[in-house]
Image: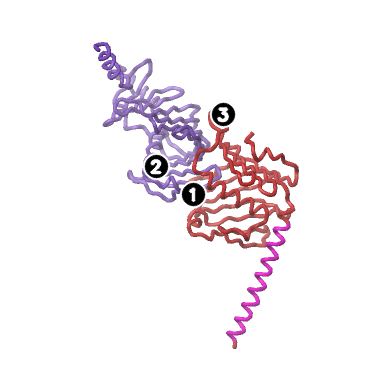
Chain colours: A red, B purple
Amino acid sequence: MKTVKILCLTVVLTWAASDCAADTWQKLRGQMQGIRSIRADFVQEKTLKILQNPLISKGIFLFKAPDMIRWEYKSPVRVVSLVHGDTVRRYVFTEAGKWVPDSSNSLQAIRMVMHRIIGWLTGRFNQDAMFEATYRAGPPARVVLTPKDRHLSAIISGVDLVFSDIPGVLREIVIREGADNTTRIRFENVRLNKPIPNTRFRVVQ
Amino acid sequence: MKRGLVIIVLMLSACSDLPVIRQVPLSMRTGITSTCMKAYPGGQWTAVHSIDITLPGGGHSMMLGVTSRTAHGLHSVLMSPEGMVLFQGDLTGGKIHVQRAVHPMDDPEFQRRMFNDIRRLFFPPGQGPALVGRAQKRIICRWVMPGRVVDVTPGDPLVVREYRHKRLRLVIRYRGPFKGGFAHRMVLQTRGLLGYKMVFTLVSAKGRAR
């Protein structure tokens, strides 16, 4: 009898939790879908056991709903990834002082990452085939993403999307690749819903 | 017919890229050797470089590299600009130990070549040069190994030329200013059909002796 009671309670709590989770995702998605464009500076801190101090990279980040991104590193290297719908391009600034297309094998990985980021920016956390999403109320509120696939988990152990005080706006992304190997991308000077020309997502300069 | 033969003989004799060195007096050797060694940081250190790679065929790629020399050996990390670690491994006792390698860096041949390039960039070819002298109006410190000769010409840029079977195969140019023993920029360029070029620009460096 006692076992049955516990079982019933577990079922009720599970049902309540999933209902609550569904509400949370719905609310988050609603908040994020109100954002039509983002312009932000970013500071990336790479922590490795081998490094005494984190390696700092800086750049700018542009997003325009529903599916445009410009992810541009200004230092210490100059690299830009442009996403315009299904088209993903990546350019590197060479020592000869010219922007040229990136010829490495990384474009497929960049395409995957950029489309994940678009999914996160539009609040589609719990519809990702590669990551399991968990919401933590905080503060600060965050969505913790855990790889579903064991091959992916060998490369990335988890991703934290940390929200700012402005509803639906990300403050930082923390990517954990393993013990002592973390990438923290912090967004600063965030400006929302300002007009951004589409050419910024198609043309490197 | 005779003229053709003479031309062929002249061409074959011109196949050697290796300059003939006129040695300097013994009293000048130590001073010149120390200027040749300026390219190579001694002691234990960690350096971060941006790496602009020109692939065979002319394509480009950009990476970040962390190299560390410890008492145990050499440690290398290669990252994408986004911070994704693509390769992490050690070279200790002549053996490569891989902690992490994402395709195509999981290829042992790639890893062997990569550590060879790191050794060329940061370590002298051997204990001390076999010859120190002048050739083609240049000062040269020469290391001689079986099938391989390495010439170092001091200056800015300091230039390393590696010859295999008397043919020039690889050139490294070190440009100053030198900070803590590290050149601001190193350009490594290999010759041949699969030749590639890598431009290393110093981001930061910690530690070091000498």
Name the residue beneath numbered marker 3: A97
Q: Is residue A25 left or right of residue B122?
A: right
The percent position of residue A13, horizontal first and vertical second, equals 65, 75
Tag 1 secondary structure: loop
Q: Could you classify mark 1 by the number of other residues whose Cα lies within 10 Å: few (under 14), some (14-19), or many (20 or more)?
A: few
Name the residue beneath numbered marker 1: A49
Identify the mark nearer the N-term, 1 or 3: 1
Residue with the most extreme front position: B1
Viewer-side residue, A2 vs A103: A103
Tag 2 secondary structure: helix
Q: Look at the image and say whether residue A12 sits in the magenta stretch.
A: yes
State if disc 3 and disc 1 touch (CB < 8 Å): no
State if disc 1 and disc 2 touch (CB < 8 Å): no
State if disc 2 and disc 3 touch (CB < 8 Å): no
Q: What is the span of residues highlighted in magenta in the rendered image?
A: A2-30
Name the residue beneath numbered marker 2: B110
The percent position of residue A119, horizontal first and vertical second, equals 64, 53
Amino acid on which the number 3 mark rests in the picture: Gly
Q: Give the residue displayed 63% in from the left and 73% down from the top.
A: A14
Mark 3 on the same chain as mark 2: no
> Mark 2, mark 1: which one is toward the viewer?
2
Viewer-side residue, A16 vs B176: A16
Q: Is residue B85 left or right of residue B26?
A: right
